[in-house]
Image: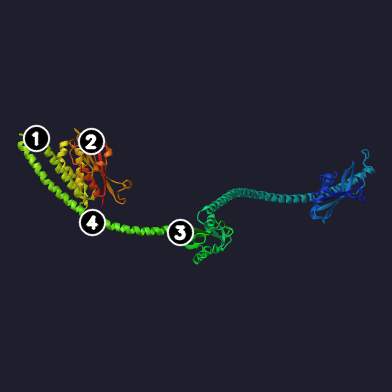
């Protein structure tokens, strides 16, 4: 039974979990820490849970004490009435409730079933039931009111929960979107991190390369043969290479940290040099080939060439000046000697030029005399030769029948020798004139000259059934008479050196040379335009080893008994081509015909 003076009770939190409890002894006890919480509604007796729930709900909302009286309940098979008092504890950090339970009625004895109807006990019982029914009706109305309030609260809570749920859904979507953005950002950060790693690696590699380049440059500076000095902004020596110490016979202790103008016997304290060095760093200038002449203690009189420029290793280090020193004493000495030599050479050249000028004048007189001699000699020789030929012919015609056979043969040989002598004299005269011709160059149509030459050979062409194939030739600046002689000799050779019992053919073609083809001829003018005229026949040809020999005067490849001629024709052709600032070539194999190529400029 519940004690009257110390009603049992519990202290519950907002979640209706029991925090403290008090039994019939009147002492408040804490719930055991670490154990699962006990819910007051689950611990309530049968019949009290509903009323206790309603009472706690009302107090939670109103924050006012509430008492519910005469609540029936069953305890050990006996019906009892209990009053519940719920007090809000407002002075606590979190909302708590104090729930007290009081016993408000004595237990009612169980009435036996044999009690007579209408008896005193039966009437009393009926009266109590009626009273109880009225109370129940009243409580039912209150319950309905409470249920309505609870329902409204529940709907309000449901609406709040629905709103909260919508907010949660929205928040979830926002969180999902944010998560996607975070994933994207994560990927971007990862990409950026990878890029940073690559950039960092590149920077590391570049730093390594810079270190290697610096070591490489330092090794060059150390081993270079010219003396080098590195100066700071105050023109104090920071370092020098081995060549400096060797040339000027000094040490690091006597050089590094010293003012450059105090080195040695102040040999570098030159006003012009000082002015130039002081401007290098402030005005970003340099020194190029500044020449210094000085009597150095360890070297004697020397000429030095100085060059200086700004240098720096990295952004954190101040800029420096690299001063390079080159000993050009020997060079200047050689230049001086060469200058004297050049003056002497120029004097000798002038003397030689004057001598050559006099020699040329003498040679011109000699050539004129030689030409006159050749002309006179050829005419003077022609007259007795003409008489020999005339008398030999008369002797043969008049007395041929009276001559014995040996005499006839001798007369025939005299006539033949006279003819060859006449041709030889004419050839020599033509060759002499060709060497010193003063004829003027003029625009010449090579087609007209070729037609005239072919016309001159009409009888021989008909006699040998020869065929001449020709292409259109260009118009060039030339000496027509010499070009006529050139074509005459080439076509004459093709007809003369033809194969027996074979009709000869001659093909004459022409083309313009490309600049690459002009480059192949070392004696041609690279800026001029050239044409190539080819004469190709199917005659007996010649061995290629004689390709140069055939253009020499009086050189023959065949005996006179086999082919007539003086050995002047091709020499005359070469002379004509040279006079026209061109070239001529012969190409052949024995019994396979010959090809003569003539290269002539379009303009002289």
Instruction: Please state which of the two labelled residues, at mark 3 or mark 2, is closer to the viewer.
Output: 3
Q: Name the residue carrying label 4.
A: 361
Res 69 seen here: no
Using the numbered discs, state the Cα–Cα distance from disc 4 to disc 2 in whole angstroms.
46 Å
Using the numbered discs, state the Cα–Cα distance from disc 3 to disc 1 in whole angstroms.
91 Å
Residue 321, image x and y in percent? Answer: 53, 60
Is 345 in front, or is 84? 345
Circle on res. 407: 1
Using the numbered discs, state the Cα–Cα distance from disc 1 to disc 4 in whole angstroms.
54 Å
Using the numbered discs, state the Cα–Cα distance from disc 3 to disc 2 in whole angstroms.
71 Å
Q: Name the residue carrying label 3.
A: 329
Looking at the image, is mark 4 or mark 3 earlier in the sequence? Answer: 3
Res 299 seen here: yes
Residue furthest out toward the bottom: 271
Q: Residue at x 9, y 35 (%)?
A: 408
Mark 2: secondary structure: loop
User: Does residue 284 lie above or below 577 as drawn?
Assistant: below
User: Does residue 116 lie above or below 313 as drawn?
Assistant: above
Circle on res. 540: 2
Residue 298, image x and y in percent? Answer: 52, 59
Using the numbered discs, state the Cα–Cα distance from disc 4 to disc 3 in whole angstroms.
47 Å
Question: Is mark 4 in CB contact (under 8 Å) with mark 2?
Answer: no
């Amino acid at each position: 039974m519940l004690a009257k003076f110390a009603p049992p009770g519990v202290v519950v939190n907002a979640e209706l979990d029991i925090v403290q409890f008090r039994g019939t002894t009147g002492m408040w006890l804490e719930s055991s820490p670490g154990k699962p919480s006990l819910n007051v509604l689950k611990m309530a007796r049968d019949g009290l849970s509903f009323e206790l729930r309603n009472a706690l709900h009302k107090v939670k909302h109103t924050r006012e004490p509430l008492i519910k009286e005469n609540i029936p309940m069953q305890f050990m098979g006996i019906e009892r009435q209990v009053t519940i008092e719920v007090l809000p504890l407002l002075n606590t950090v979190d909302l708590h409730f104090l729930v007290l339970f009081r016993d408000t009625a004595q237990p009612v004895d169980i009435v036996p079933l044999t009690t007579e109807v209408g008896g005193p006990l039966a009437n009393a019982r009926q009266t109590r039931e009626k009273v109880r029914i009225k109370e129940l009706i009243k409580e039912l109305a209150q319950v309905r009111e409470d249920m309505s309030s609870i329902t409204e609260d529940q709907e309000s809570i449901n609406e709040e929960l629905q709103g909260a749920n919508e907010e949660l859904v929205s928040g979830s979507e926002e969180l999902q979107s944010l998560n996607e953005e975070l994933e994207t950002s994560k990927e971007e950060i990862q990409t950026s991190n990878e890029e940073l790693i690559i950039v960092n690696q590149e920077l590391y590699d570049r730093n390594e390369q810079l270190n290697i380049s610096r070591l490489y440059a330092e090794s060059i500076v150390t081993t270079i043969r010219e003396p080098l000095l590195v100066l700071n902004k105050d023109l104090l020596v920071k370092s020098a290479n081995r060549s400096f110490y060797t040339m000027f016979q000094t040490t690091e202790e006597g050089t590094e940290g010293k003012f450059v103008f105090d080195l040695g016997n102040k040999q570098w304290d030159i006003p012009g040099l000082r002015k130039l060095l002081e401007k290098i760093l402030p005005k970003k200038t340099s020194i190029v080939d500044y020449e210094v002449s000085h009597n150095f203690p360890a070297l004697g009189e020397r000429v030095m060439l100085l060059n200086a420029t700004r240098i720096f290793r990295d952004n954190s280090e101040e800029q420096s000046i690299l001063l390079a020193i080159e000993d050009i004493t020997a060079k200047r000495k050689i230049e001086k000697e060469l200058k004297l030599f050049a003056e002497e050479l120029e004097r000798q050249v002038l003397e030689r030029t004057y001598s050559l000028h006099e020699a040329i004048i003498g040679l011109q007189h000699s050539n004129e005399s030689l030409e006159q001699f050749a002309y006179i000699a050829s005419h003077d020789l022609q007259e007795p030769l003409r008489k020999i030929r005339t008398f030999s012919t008369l002797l043969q015609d008049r007395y041929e029948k009276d001559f014995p056979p040996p005499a006839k043969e001798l007369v025939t040989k005299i006539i033949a020798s006279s003819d060859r002598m006449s041709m030889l004299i004419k050839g020599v005269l033509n060759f002499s004139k060709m060497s010193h011709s003063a004829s003027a160059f003029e625009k010449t149509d090579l087609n007209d000259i070729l037609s005239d030459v072919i016309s001159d050979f009409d009888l021989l062409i008909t006699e040998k059934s020869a065929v001449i194939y020709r292409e259109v030739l260009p118009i060039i600046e030339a000496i027509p008479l010499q070009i006529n002689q050139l074509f005459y000799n080439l076509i004459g050779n093709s007809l003369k050196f033809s194969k027996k019992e074979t009709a000869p053919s001659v093909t004459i073609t022409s083309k313009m040379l490309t600049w690459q083809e002009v480059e192949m001829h070392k004696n041609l003018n690279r800026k001029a335009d050239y044409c190539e005229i080819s004469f190709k026949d199917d005659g007996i040809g010649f061995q290629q080893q004689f390709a140069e020999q055939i253009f020499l005067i009086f050189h023959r490849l065949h005996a006179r008994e086999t082919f007539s001629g003086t050995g002047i024709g091709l020499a005359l052709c070469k002379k004509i081509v040279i006079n026209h600032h061109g070239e001529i070539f012969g190409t052949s194999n024995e019994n396979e015909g010959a090809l003569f190529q003539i290269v002539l400029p379009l303009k002289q």
